[in-house]
Amino acid sequence: MVVSDGEATMDAANATGGFAKHPPRRKVIIDTDPGIELIAGGHRAVPSGRVSPGFGFGEASGNLDLGAWCCADDMMAIFMAFQAPEVEVIGLTTIFGNVDTDLATINALHLCEMAGFPEVPVAEGPSQPLKRVKPRIAYFVHGSDGLGETNQAKPKGQKLPKSAPDFLIEKVAEFPGEVTVVALGPLTNIALAIEKDPNFAKNVGQLVVLGGSFNASGNVNPAAEANIFGDPEAADVVFTAGLNTLTIGINLTTQVIFNEQDLCEIRDSGGKYGQYIFDCCRFYHDWHLASDHFDGIYLHDPTCMAALLDPTLFTFKKGAVRVETEGLCVGHTLLDMGLKNWVGNNPWIGVPPIDVGITVDADGVRTLVKKLLCSS
């Protein structure tokens, strides 16, 4: 696919020469805050997305690392990865967020066992941000257990003895250019890996981030989205490090909603996770009703996972992104849209560009999420 300063128009089938019947599986690591990060192996041909100027997908391969803090929507994204035939989850890493890191790790181990993949390794991240003493823990969103107060049984498995950053460094070095890391929580683990290993950024095949609020209000305060606010210094390190990064902000994820009917459809589908998903989402649903005054749930993490699985459902804009780390708007993400030739220097000049989600086919994402979560 050729990308110029205009919009890329080649469709997925033309870009790939037609889809292979049995594409190789894509290695994925999920960095999450249930809290876990998921790592997967293999690779697949990724169809070229409908993209805005300066962005395009070609052949994507590698392992995927997902970062999150393990809660109801993290749980759905992780199950999507386990159910997607083109993905091989090779690990999860955990971080604070909706729960503290210790509980995120327990939940990650539990979700691997629940999904039928108890052998998937889980590595635990730090308990606090890069430079801030106390992490923000949002127990009020998904309950004190991070899984909707469902009080799940303690997992049988154990976390790895090595840290999440060391695990990430090891896996991307083992499969250079092949691992995709999906970061569903604060970016602390990714930033620590970057700072510890100068080869980490070039070894990562792709980083897919859930974070930011681009041209939209935040969900922690009017300026900031929760994952970036959770460790703004880490986010700025990651967004400026030169990784092949794609980020999906809440300007898109708040357009993708499951209502009560959707949740009941998943519950009654006969899928292996149906009742479990429904039960875990009750607390999250009630919180949305009280906080956002609507009868449904936002599919933040599943929408991010959908961007990995089918990027044709999105359009993207390439540009430098910086994160505010001081003052009133800590955690605010600012994208240089490339609309002006700046006179003089500024903090965006010379920063490697990343790909930022600009539009989403909300119905298409909902259909994909249901397809994977309703399958047995």
Image (spheres, grey):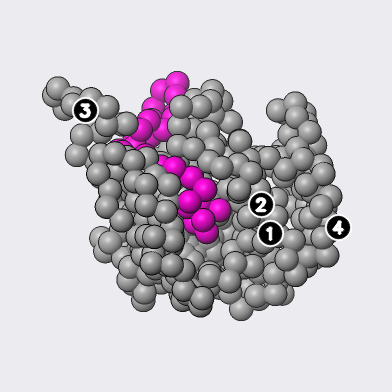
Secondary structure of the residue carrying tag 4 is loop
* Marks 3, 1: nearer the viewer: 1
From the top left corner, tell me how far across and down residue 268 is, in percent.
Answer: 86, 57
Residue 237 got which mark? none
* Residue sitting at x 37%, y 55%: 57
Percent of width and height locating residue 6: 29, 39
Categorize mark 1 by other alpha carbons within 10 Å: few (<14), some (14-19), many (20+): some
Locate residue 178 relative to residue 80 in the image: left or right: left
Q: What residue type is labelled 4?
A: Asp
Residue 346: mark: 3
Q: Looking at the image, tell me whether mark 4 or mark 1 is earlier in sequence order.
A: 4
Q: What type is the residue that disc 1 sits on?
A: Lys
In the rendered image, is residue 304 in sight? yes
SS assignment at label 1: helix
Circles 1 and 2 in contact, beta carbons < 8 Å: yes
Asked if marks 3 and 1 touch (Cβ < 8 Å), the reply is no
For label 2, the SS is helix
Quick one: 255 or 235, which is closer to the camera? 255
- Residue tagged by mark 2? 367
How far apart are the alpha carbons under marks 3 and 2?
A: 42 Å
